[in-house]
Image: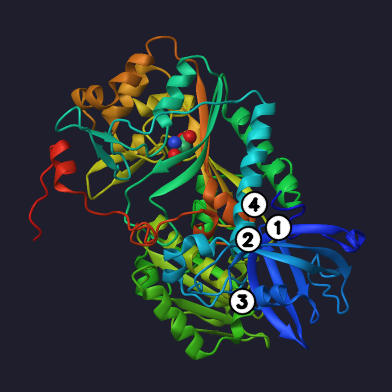
Amino acid sequence: MYRTHTCGELRIGNAGQKVTLAGWVQRTRKLGGMTFIDLRDRYGITQLVVEADAEASLLGTATSLGREYVIQAIGTVVERQSKNSKMPTGDIEIKLDKINILNKSMTPPFTIEDESDGGEDIRAKYRYLDLRRNPLQKALALRHRLAHEVRNYLDAHDFMEIETPYLIKSTPEGARDFVVPSRMNPGEFYALPQSPQTFKQLLMVAGYDRYFQIVRCFRDEDLRADRQPEFTQIDCEMSFVEQDDVLNMFEGMMRTLFKNVIGVDVPNPLPRMSWFDAMDNYGSDKPDVRFGMTIHEITDKVKGKGFSILDEAKYVGAIAVPGGAEYTRKQIDELTEWVKRPQVGAKGLIYIKLNADGSVKSSVDKFYAPEDLKAIGEAVEAKTGDIIFIMSGNEKRKVQTMLGVLRIEMGNRLGLRDPKVFAPLWIVDFPLLEWSDEDNRFYAMHHPFTAPKPEHMDLFYSNKKEDLERVCANAYDFVLNGTELGGGSIRIHDSEVQKRMFEVLGIGPEEAEYKFGFIIHAFQYGAPPHGGLAFGFDRVCALFAGKDTIRDFIAFPKNNMGCDVMIDSPSRIDKVQLDELHIDIRKEQ
Ligand code: ASP
């Protein structure tokens, strides 16, 4: 037997027992002739001690140990002289009789401590060493716990976990597909799934009325911060359901995860906010509702005072930032520059300070009398001591989005976004379609399988752009603390409606048949009404841990360039492989 106990297990009650532990040498130190060794495994750290008068061979072995050596340690549990209350095993140590070196280790390129001295690149290259560190072990343990609870909950509600294929057909809509060349079918390619969307719908047609899968998905997107080209979804679908059935089922699941995994109670039922309210009040379809500072429209309040920028704007909105009347000129200038960065895209920032002494001061004093400014303050529900930030423009949603970005930034600066506070909610009633001026066509706001609301069917069959823009869907997002954790919809299950959807999206009948014929046909064989959703599992893990980067919650993630520097992937393949795949690589430009 390699070990009788783990390194996190022994307590004072075990004193006197003979034990055998196995693990990695975290560090060794000598003190007054005694040698202390911290032995680590996944479960914790136990202190080992070799007495000054131990046998020479044991002393010799103890002093020869390097960091990360793998050893087996045999000895007796004894009470420690100087206890360490910070460690669960801190009351005891193991007085050693014998050490067996199971394997040596080169000196690791960085310290395997909670706070490592290794930079990100080196830790990525030696991910298997980084994974020995406690924070990463905790992160993966949380991931495991969450997956386990998801399976328990869904199993208890009659969901079946069914695997769907990874080698499928390329139908890029939204993100780019990763493709895989087919050796047996020269010139043809599989695509890796961006999600199992069509397969889970086919499972509904097949009668598996409650499906789920914790499944890898692949999207070949330019990697924005904290995106991974392969990521995991909790993917679910149900038949014979309306929107409420889906929302109730999955807020039940999320409530169970909150309670069982991190001991947090969230409201029952969860709040639901329409997409329109989210945009109007928060300037975002994933509002962070942990704090107020909501957006107020003041278009009517600012007109007719001779200030042409606001007079001409179709939409004027504002937020009131608590305590902001204290801001210095320099701080306001810095914020103004901040909103002018391309990532925000504002032209400028108008401010009104409601000073503690009752006076007002603004960047537009020339045009507005103090009473006008105070009236704006009231409209924005600002308090004495606040600063009001105003933005304007012709496109309401654009201005609201910029105010929304500013709101989040102010929330960050004011410490209003505590990651240990959880404010989940549903966003509902999304528009079905989104017009792109650039491409002069509609895109599906969620995806092309999302059904129009039954009461909007007439609008859906209209050929007028403004009618189609008004069509809403029974689509929903699960939002937590300003992040979209999941989303889904009630689906189209009628082949004629599905055809119409493709038509609206500018996908001609031939193209629709080529790309999606299988699903249109399937709908002709008794497709039940159905709907579902998917959660981004990596992000669920990160947010439950109060973190905002998903990388630590994936055992072997990719870097910002989509590379795994540990295995050096992607990489070239040799000529023989290329030939088999019927692929020529163009000469490098
Ligand atoms: N397949 C969708 C997605 O990946 C989720 C859903 O509609 O169920 O976003």
Identify the amino acid type marked 3: Ser
Q: What label sits on residue 546 in the rendered view?
A: 2
Mark 4 vs mark 2: in front: 4
Q: Nearer the viewer, residue 105 or 556?
A: 105
* SS for dot 3: helix
Residue 475 horizontal/vertical position (percent): 49, 36
**Image-based side of 529 in relation to 293, left or right:** left
Q: Is residue 292 visible?
A: no
Label 3: few (<14), some (14–19) or many (≥20) C-alpha neighbours in 10 Å:
few
Residue 264 horizontal/vertical position (percent): 74, 52
Residue 177 horizontal/vertical position (percent): 30, 42
* SS for dot 2: loop
Asked whether disc 3 touches disc 4, contact meaning CB atoms under 8 Å apart, the reply is no
Q: Nearer the viewer, residue 312 or 556?
A: 556
Q: Nearer the viewer, residue 29 or 494?
A: 29
Label 4: few (<14), some (14–19) or many (≥20) C-alpha neighbours in 10 Å:
some
Q: Is residue 115 visible?
A: yes
| Residue 185, image quadrant | top left
The residue depicted at 12 percent of the width and 49 percent of the height is: 585
Q: Earlier in the sequence, mark 3 or mark 4?
A: 3
Q: Earlier in the sequence, mark 2 or mark 3?
A: 3
The residue depicted at 33 percent of the width and 28 percent of the height is: 501
- Asked if disc 4 is less than 8 Å from ligand 1, the answer is no
**Image-based side of 60 in relation to 196, left or right:** right
Q: Earlier in the sequence, mark 4 or mark 1?
A: 1
* SS for dot 1: loop
Q: Nearer the viewer, residue 476 or 223?
A: 223
The residue depicted at 49 percent of the width and 19 percent of the height is: 204
Identify the amino acid type marked 4: Leu
Location of residue 509 with respect to 307 vertically, above or below = above
Q: Earlier in the sequence, mark 1 or mark 3?
A: 1
Q: Which residue is mark 4?
A: 142
